[in-house]
Amino acid sequence: MKTLILVRHAKSSWDAPGMTDLERPLNERGKKDAPEMAVRLKEKGIRLDQVVSSPAKRAKKTARYFAEEFNLEKNMILLSDQLYDALPDAFSKTVEGLQDPYHTVALFSHNPGITEYVAGLTNVRVDDMPTCAMFGVQADVENWSEFGKAEKKFLFFDYPKNPLP
């Protein structure tokens, strides 16, 4: 069984004109939302084995908050250039290349690609992945290379402004 958690980076800052897109940090709301969403993920009974992030500063920082909540060492956060400004195909290739000993992996990336990828995974309709949104799916496969073609089970869709049950 393989479980994939897709996370859009938390809210970023636009305060520094001239800063490259890759360098943009999280703003105060992002710094608050990311650890809260990591706790929510843990409360769902998820146990992360690995984190893969876009190299953009805002995505890496969001990923670090999650890794800290799950007590993952820094070396368990892999950076993938494929996840920056990614189209759905790049997500598929990233997932197919994941290491099979890891059963639950979180990918941290950006819109619009993450929303487009999520929209094609299951029959659950998601028109937008807000900042720090999480989408979880599961496939009954042994290898990540089989994940793309496998039938997927929707687990959850959650985001910071989602009213708690």
Image (cartoon, rainbow, N blue to C red):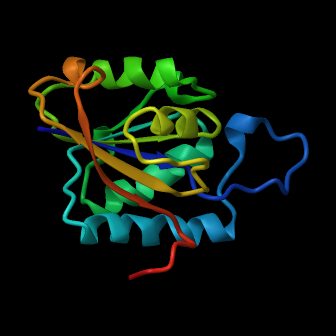
The foreground one among 71 and 82 is 82
The foreground one among 49 and 143 is 143
In this rendering, position of residue 164 left or right of residue 21: left
Query: In the image, is residue 151 above or below residue 104?
Result: above
Residue 12 at least partly seen? yes
Quarter of the image that includes the C terminus: bottom left
Number of labels in the image equals: 0
Query: In the image, is residue 96 above or below residue 10?
Result: above
Residue at image x 12%, y 29%? 141
Residue at image x 33%, y 45%? 74
> Percent from the top left, x then y, of residue 54?
52, 34
Residue at far front of view: 123
Query: In the image, is residue 122 above or below residue 89?
Result: below
> Percent from the top left, x then y, of residue 108?
47, 42
> Percent from the top left, x then y, of residue 111?
63, 40
Quarter of the image that includes the N terminus: top left
Residue at far right of view: 17
Query: In the image, is residue 137 above or below residue 139?
Result: below
> Percent from the top left, x then y, of residue 65?
43, 60
In this rendering, position of residue 7 left or right of residue 55: left
The foreground one among 116 and 44 is 116
Residue at image x 22%, y 26%? 150
Residue 55 at least partly seen? no
